[in-house]
Image (cartoon, rainbow, N blue to C red):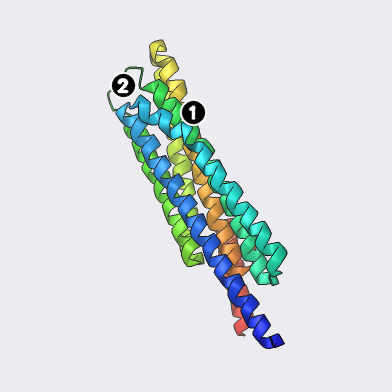
Amino acid sequence: MEAADLGQHISRRFNEDMERVRTRVMQMGGFVEQQLQQAVIALVEGDSELGEQIARDDYKVNRMEVEIDEECGRIIATRQPTASDLRVMVAIIKTITDLERIGDEVEKVGFIAAKLALMEKPADHYREIRHLGKLVTEMVHDALHAFARLDADEAFEVARRDRKVDEEYEAIQRQSITFMMEDPRSIRRALEVMWVVRAMERIGDHAKNICEYTVYMVHGKDIRHLSLDDAERQIRDSAQERQG
């Protein structure tokens, strides 16, 4: 085989490997998203059995992370990726770590949903949790969509929603404290609710992280320690300098 043909062969095999890994990341993300949706349903509807099932299935998320991580290691060792391809591999490994951590938070919500199912429901049937759950589920879904499409603009848009999640989280925390002060009988349930919304706030953080990795894949810039406004401005300035 000629050197040029060999290079083309290696490149083709690498692209096939990468496409397979990206597909598996999306499958893992889809499963985590589904688990999150079901955990919120279990809590709102008081379905103890569903909550316990969600918690038990966390091992599937862990297994996916290990398998994808091992596959990435094999590709790096055997395909010798270029700097830009290696950047993508690093972003994928970081993404599955955050997906696994979202799975851990969903597991907590499942366990708490099973416990709350045994308590009397509040009059609003956990309306605020339902709303916050919708916000973070959409964040996870759209962060994965931006990741799949390598869409940095969408990634920035999704990352900005984390502020709204934080605001909702803080409002529910304040409300729960008020309930406990007004009615000591509500303390146990209110504490469990506070753990749930804390888990959801963390899920929002992990979704934002995935958006930051997408920006890193597209632009090669680590924006984790920058404000979103500063990151967008620096990327825009760099693009203008290259064009000028």
Residue 235 shown left or right of residue 60 in the figure: right
Which residue is depicted at the point 57% across and 57% down?
212
Amino acid type, residue under disc 2 in the picture: Lys
Please state which of residues 76 and 204 is positioned toward the viewer in this rendering. Answer: 76
Q: Is residue 67 above or below residue 203?
A: below
Q: Is residue 153 above or below residue 199?
A: below
Q: Residues within 10 Å of mark 2 (few under 14, many from 20)?
A: some
> Disc 2 or 1, which lies upstream in sequence?
2
Amino acid type, residue under disc 1 in the picture: Trp
Tell me where residue 108 appears, x and y as whole percent: 49, 31
Q: Which of the image's four quarters has the N terminus?
A: bottom right
Tell me where residue 81 appears, x and y as whole percent: 68, 70
Task: Tell which residue pokes out farthest to the left in this image.
Answer: 123
Q: Secondary structure at mark 1?
A: helix
Tell me where residue 182 appears, x and y as whole percent: 39, 15
Residue 195 has which mark?
1
Mark 2 to mark 1: distance in Å? 16 Å
Which residue is depicted at the point 39% across and 11% down?
185
Disc 2 and disc 1 in contact, CB within 8 angstroms: no
Please state which of residues 198 and 58 is positioned toward the viewer in this rendering. Answer: 58
Q: Residues within 10 Å of mark 1 (few under 14, many from 20)?
A: some
Which residue is depicted at the point 42% across and 41% down?
35
Tell me where residue 5 appears, x and y as whole percent: 65, 86
Residue 130 shown left or right of residue 23 in the figure: left
Q: Is residue 175 at least partly visible in the picture?
A: no
Residue 113 shown left or right of residue 239 in the figure: left
Which residue is the site of mark 2?
A: 121
Q: Is residue 131 at least partly visible in the picture?
A: yes
Please state which of residues 10 and 35 is positioned toward the viewer in this rendering. Answer: 10
Q: Secondary structure at mark 2?
A: loop
Q: Which of the image's four quarters has the C terminus?
A: bottom right
Q: Quadrant of residue 237?
A: bottom right
